């Protein structure tokens, strides 16, 4: 407890006091006899006195029931003889300027004053009045020193005993219950005044949006929405008769004294004795209150804030000291400095009392240097330095207390980290370059390093599952973090640290020590082309241990993998891991659809070598893939790959490559002579014919007929190849059969040139007939095309003559139909079918 207020006796009257009000340094007292006194308060050092300014003995014929002042308009509102009246407070006898006749029978009233400042700086004042007349609530507004009806009357459940108006809500106290009434007429019952509903209501305005309501020996806060602040309440030593609110204090008039309490922190601050039989207490202004009994008036003045603050700080009541400083009238600069100092003391005191979360909230408000906060915890910084200006942190914390403190520190550091990053990003955005990367200043980087390293230590002691996510986006100090993770045996997290810090070799060496092929593969896949040397170096042991899985280092569907230099990868695989070369090339060619001849040639080479090494019996599958690839791929270099093919095997593959080079006779010779498979030769000829290659369509079948009739017409230069004698024999029947089936695909002259002279005409009758029909058909087609072209030519000539026969005479007297200007000698004109002639530049306007 401390001395917050001093009490001064002001006056004793011989009349019974019924109402008091005050404004500025003025006090007004109304009596049962209808007298009205106005005093001026005079402060001399620590003493307070009053001087009588005006006295109206005949202010009212009956008792003065209630008084309120509207200072901005110099008006006094009174309730006398159950009637609301408005008086000029500057007049000698408080001249009555207005009466609300409708208010006859009023028992209580409440005034609401709202001040609003416009954008131009002008201040508008709205004064509203609520009057309780029996079970009705009348609402008025002030204009030109008169009250006018605001809206229709609101019906009430009972006759109000107490009433306070905040914003658009009026709190009413009935004999045994409280209720809220909104201006739209909606009423909300709150709670009874006591368990027996026998207590008188007691209401006071705590803020612009909050009411303080008494319920027996307890006072609770209720906002304008009817919501009760359950965590905030005042508990008095007895049932209060009436209340006054003087932030941050609440003064309750008890039967034997006046008790001063605070809401935050809750508790009794001071007891004001020797104030017996007090009936009224009002707040005039901040730090100045008046209280009165039946015949005596006291002034309650707040002790100087500086004196109170010193006492509070000495007793470590930092929260109350902070509230007092915030509402004081001190210089703004000094006030800001004192508030910061008190908040800092409060934060350290909360920490010393093991209220860790509350302490960290204060540190966040102060934006305290994270280093100063971190060093409150043992072993979180490499070197501890004592803070001499503030209380010592608690020592010998239990395991539970330490965990609670670390969790609070985590919340603080996480928020500070977010603020630092947001400020840096905001600076980048302010420069307007959206593509600019976020570059932290050196000091910010150092601070983030301290924060993240400390967060890592906290996570390891509270929730190590959060370590990995932190390390992926971290600014941790490499050396210290590495030391901690090794000590804790956190190898997975250590690998993440190395990865985010660019220490890829150390990460890969650790993975190799643990034989983690799967994690090594995933790690290498994300390194990218800039680290190609490391990829090749550390993929070697993975490919040795697991070739199929290891190949995913170079074939996974990832942007980083696809961007690797493929020729270098191929070279590495060819030198060290030949078993996976074919799968790699197949992925490059078929999945990535790389058209580089290097890879297509290499794949042909690998297929060929594998087929040769496997032997005829086991190479069927490989040869099938080779044949399919040679037929479909347009990107391999035929003459390059042909030179490496053997001459005594893989003949069909050789035939396809020769065909790609346009050497169709040699291809056909391989099918007919070397393979003895005329059917494949026919299929080959058909493909060439369908390809529509100029000069090859008509010749390919003639070449085939020629080979069948004379196998030696195209010698095979294939050393080591043994030809069957059967394939060297001419076969006239076969030639005539081919001639019969494919007659329309051959040039008659070329075929007749290779046929023997002794072939009867009857055997080639059908061929000659087809050839003749083909020639006649072609002749007719040419003649028809010629006729169509000639007809089109005649139409064009006719149109030309028709257009040339039309003309129009334009002179300097003619005008444009659009712009109405005359045509000049150099004008470009356009004529429309209806005969209109306009400037060429005016045609768009006409449209």
Image: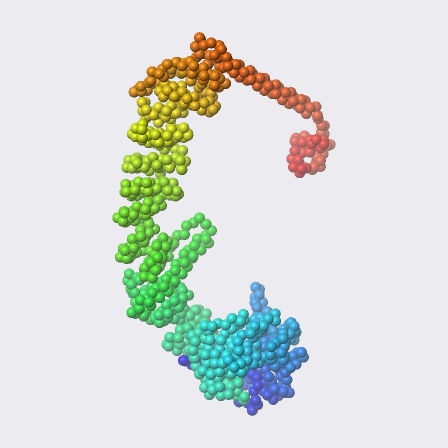
Q: Position of residue 707 (x, y in %)?
A: 40, 16
Place of residue 306 in the rendered image (x, y in percent of width and height, measured from the top left)? 42, 76
How has the structure been colored for display? rainbow
The answer to whether 17 appears left or right of 716 in the picture is right
The quadrant of the picture occupied by the C terminus is top right
Task: Residue 109 in the image: state x and y as whole percent.
Answer: 60, 78
The number of numbered discs placed on residues in the rendered structure image is: 0
Identified at 34% across, 42% down, the residue is 552
In the displayed structure, 695 sits above or below 758; it is: below
Residue 64 appears in the rendering: yes
Looking at the image, the residue that sits furthest to the top is 758
Q: Is 574 displayed left or right of 170 in the figure?
A: left
Give the position of the N terminus as an image quadrant.
Answer: bottom left
Asked whether the viewer can see residue 527, the reply is no
Residue 812 is situated, as x and y percent measured from the top left of the image, at: 72, 31
Which residue appears at 41% of the width and 50% of the height? 437
Q: Residue 352: which quarter of the image?
A: bottom left
**Viewer-side residue, 146 vs 726:** 726
Residue 27 appears left or right of 550: right
Is 506 rendered above or below residue 688?
Answer: below
Q: Is residue 137 left or right of residue 192?
A: right
Task: Please say if 199 is above or below 704.
Answer: below
Q: Residue at x 71, y 29 (%)?
A: 810
User: In the rendered image of this protein, does residue 536 appear above or below residue 92?
Assistant: above
Nearest to the observer: residue 537 or residue 6: 537
- Depth check, front residue: 181 or 457: 181
What residue do we see at 51% from left, 73% from top?
Answer: 222
């Amino acid at each position: 407890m401390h001395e917050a207020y001093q009490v001064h006796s002001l006056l004793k009257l011989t009349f019974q006091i019924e109402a008091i009000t005050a404004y500025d340094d003025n006090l007004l007292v109304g009596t049962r006899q209808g007298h009205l006194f106005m005093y001026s308060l005079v402060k001399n050092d620590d003493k307070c006195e009053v001087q009588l300014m005006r006295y109206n003995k005949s202010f009212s014929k009956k008792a003065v029931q209630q008084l309120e002042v509207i200072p901005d308009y110099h008006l006094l509102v009174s309730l006398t003889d159950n009637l609301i009246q408005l008086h000029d407070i500057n007049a000698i006898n408080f001249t009555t300027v207005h009466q609300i006749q409708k208010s006859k029978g009023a028992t209580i009233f409440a005034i609401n004053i709202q001040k609003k400042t416009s954008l131009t700086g002008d201040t508008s004042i709205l004064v509203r009045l609520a009057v309780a007349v029996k079970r009705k609530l009348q609402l008025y507004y002030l204009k030109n020193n008169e009250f006018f009806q605001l809206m229709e009357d609101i019906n009430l459940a009972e006759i109000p005993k107490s009433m306070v108006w905040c914003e658009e809500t009026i709190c009413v106290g009935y004999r045994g219950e409280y209720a809220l009434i909104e201006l739209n007429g909606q009423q909300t019952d709150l709670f009874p005044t006591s368990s027996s509903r026998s207590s008188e209501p007691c209401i006071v305005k705590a803020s612009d949006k909050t009411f303080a309501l008494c319920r027996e020996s307890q006072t609770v806060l209720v906002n304008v929405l009817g919501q009760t602040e359950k965590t905030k309440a005042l508990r008095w030593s007895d049932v209060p008769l009436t209340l006054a609110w003087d932030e941050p204090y609440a003064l309750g008039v008890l039967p034997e004294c006046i008790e001063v309490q605070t809401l935050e922190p809750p508790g009794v601050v001071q007891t004001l004795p020797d104030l017996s039989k007090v009936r009224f207490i009002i707040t005039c202004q901040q730090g100045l209150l008046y209280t009165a009994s039946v015949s005596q008036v006291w002034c309650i003045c707040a002790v100087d804030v500086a004196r109170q603050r010193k006492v509070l700080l000495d007793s470590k009541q930092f929260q109350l000291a902070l509230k007092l400083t915030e509402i004081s009238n001190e210089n703004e600069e000094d006030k800001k400095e004192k508030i910061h100092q008190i908040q800092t003391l409060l934060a350290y005191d909360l920490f010393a009392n093991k209220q860790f979360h509350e302490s960290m909230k204060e540190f966040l408000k102060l934006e305290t240097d994270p280093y100063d906060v971190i060093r409150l915890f043992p072993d979180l910084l490499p070197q501890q330095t004592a803070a001499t200006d503030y209380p010592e942190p608690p020592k010998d914390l239990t395991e539970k207390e330490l965990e609670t403190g670390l969790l609070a520190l985590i919340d603080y550091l996480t928020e500070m980290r977010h603020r630092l990053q947001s400020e840096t990003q905001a600076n980048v955005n302010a420069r307007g370059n959206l593509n600019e990367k976020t570059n932290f200043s050196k000091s910010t980087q150092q601070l983030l390093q301290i924060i993240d390293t400390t967060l890592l230590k906290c996570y390891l002691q509270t929730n190590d599952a959060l370590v990995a996510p932190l390390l992926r986006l971290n600014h941790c100090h490499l050396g210290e973090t590495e030391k901690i993770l090794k000590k804790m045996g956190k190898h997975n997290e250590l690998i993440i640290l190395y990865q985010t810090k660019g220490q890829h070799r150390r990460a890969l060496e650790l993975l190799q020590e643990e034989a983690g092929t799967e994690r090594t593969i995933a790690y290498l896949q994300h390194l990218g082309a800039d680290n190609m040397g490391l990829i090749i170096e550390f993929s070697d042991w993975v490919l040795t241990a697991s070739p199929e899985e290891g190949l995913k280092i170079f074939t996974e569907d990832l942007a980083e993998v696809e961007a690797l230099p493929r020729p270098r990868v191929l070279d590495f695989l060819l030198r060290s891991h030949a078993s996976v070369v074919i799968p790699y090339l197949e992925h490059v060619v078929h999945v990535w659809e790389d058209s580089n001849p290097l890879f297509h040639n290499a794949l042909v080479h690998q297929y060929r070598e594998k087929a040769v090494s496997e032997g005829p019996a086991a190479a069927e599958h490989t040869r099938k893939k080779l044949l399919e690839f040679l037929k479909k791929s347009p990107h391999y270099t035929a003459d390059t790959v042909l030179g490496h093919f053997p001459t005594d095997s893989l003949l069909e593959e050789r035939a396809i490559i020769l065909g790609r080079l346009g050497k169709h006779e040699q291809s056909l010779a391989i099918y007919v002579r070397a393979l003895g498979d005329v059917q494949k030769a026919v299929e080959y000829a058909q493909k060439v014919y369908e390809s529509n290659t100029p000069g090859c369509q008509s010749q390919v079948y003639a070449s085939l007929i020629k080979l069948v009739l004379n196998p030696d017409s195209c010698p095979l230069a294939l050393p080591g190849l043994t030809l069957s004698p059967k394939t060297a024999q001419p076969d006239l029947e076969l030639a005539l059969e081919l001639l019969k089936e494919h007659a329309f695909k051959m040039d008659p002259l070329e075929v007749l040139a290779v046929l023997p002279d002794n072939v009867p005409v009857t055997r080639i009758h059908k061929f000659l007939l087809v050839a003749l029909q083909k020639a006649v058909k072609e002749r007719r087609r040419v003649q028809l095309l010629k006729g169509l072209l000639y007809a089109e030519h005649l139409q064009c000539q006719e149109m030309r003559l028709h257009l040339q026969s039309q003309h129009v005479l334009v002179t300097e007297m003619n005008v444009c139909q659009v712009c109405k200007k005359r045509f000049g000698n150099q004008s470009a004109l356009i004529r429309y079918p209806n005969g209109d002639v306009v400037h060429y530049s005016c045609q768009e306007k006409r449209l």
